[in-house]
Image (tube, rainbow, N blue to C red):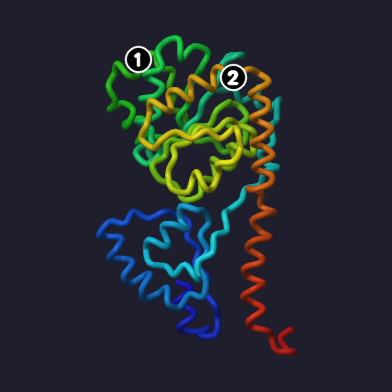
Amino acid sequence: MAVFFKLAFYLRASVIWHFHETARLNPRQRLKDVFKIRVLARFCERFIAVGVGPFQSAIARGVSPTRLILVQNGVNVTRFRADYKRRLTTREELGIPAGVMAFLLLGWEPKRKGVDLFAMAVGNLGEEGRRNKVFFIVGGSETIKAIAELPRDLLSDSRIRVISPRETFPALLDAIDVFVSASRSEGFSYAMAEALAAGKLVLSSDIPGVREGFEGSPGFWLFSNEDWRMLMQLIQRSGELSDDERSDLSRANVNYAAERLSLEAWTEKIGDVYRGMLARYPLDRNQR
C-alpha cells in the first residue's frame, strides 16, 4: 500500500519494507514474488528484516542484500520481570502443586508449532521421566483436535493439558519453569524473547533464524528440528538441574535479554536506519 501512495501522491518519499515472517518458497509464493519483489520492491529504498529467519528468507525471495538490513525486534523486558506473588497465584489457578516443574508450549497453530513433536517427547518420557512435571499447551479447538488424533497410548497419563490463551502472558510465564518451542518455522519469536526476559529455561527447535537470533545464553537449549527424542532428553535433563543451576541459568537469560533483546536496543538501531535516510533528504528552511 505504501508503494501505491508513493507512486500516486508522494514521488519523492522513501519507502521501507519490513519483513516479519519467513516465507515458504513454494510455486504459489514464487508467483506472488514475481510481482511483489521484482516489481513493487523496485520502489522501496530499504528493507528491514526483524529477525535472522526473515532476513534469510528475503534474500532467498530475491531482495538485494545491499538494500536489506537486519534489525532484530525487541521486547519490553521490564514487563516480564519475575513476580513471586503472581507466580504463586497463577500456579494455584492452574492447579500446579508445589515442587512440580511446569512446561509450556504455545500451540494454536498445531502443525507449525510442533504440537505433535512436544506430545511425542512427553508421551515417551515414561512414568519416571514425568514424575513431578506437568505440561501445558496453549491453544484452542484446532489444538485439541490435533492432540486427539495422536495415538491414545501416547497420551495416557502424559500430564498434557491444553489451556486457553490468557490476557496476561507475563503471569503465565511466571507460573511455569520451562518454555518449549518445537516450531517448524518462525519469524521473530516474541514469546521466546519474553521467556528469556522472564528468566525461564528455553528449549527450542533448531530452525533457521533461531540459533542466530537467540543462542548465546546458557539457558537456551537447542534440539534438532523434528527430533522429538532429543527434546525428550532435554526435558529429562532440565528436571535433573539443582536449584543453584536453575538460578544461574535464569539470571543468564535475564541478562541476555536485557542486553540483546530490549526495546531500547531495538529503537536505537531503528533510529540509526531512519536518521541515515533522513540525512539524505534535508528539509528546506521553511520546513524546519
Q: Compute the Cα span from label 1 to label 2.
A: 26 Å
Residue 156 is tagged as 1
The image shows residue 79, relative to residue 269, as above or below, that is above
Q: Amino acid at mark 1?
A: Ser
Q: Earlier in the sequence, mark 1 or mark 2?
A: 1
* Residue at image coords 37%, 41%: 112
Element at label 1: loop
* Viewer-side residue, 84 vs 246: 246
Residue 65 image point, x, y percent: 47, 67
Residue on which the image places disc 2? 241
* Residue at image coords 60%, 33%: 218
* Residue at image coords 28%, 56%: 26
Quadrant occupied by the C terminus = bottom right
* Residue at image coords 41%, 17%: 125
Direction from residue 31 to residue 118 in the image, left or right: right
The image shows residue 287, relative to residue 238, as above or below, that is below
Comparing marks 1 and 2, which lies closer to the viewer? 2
Outermost residue on the top side: it is 128
Direction from residue 70 to residue 231 in the image, left or right: left
Residue 85 image point, x, y percent: 71, 25
Q: Amino acid at mark 2?
A: Leu
Residue 47 is tagged as none
Element at label 2: loop
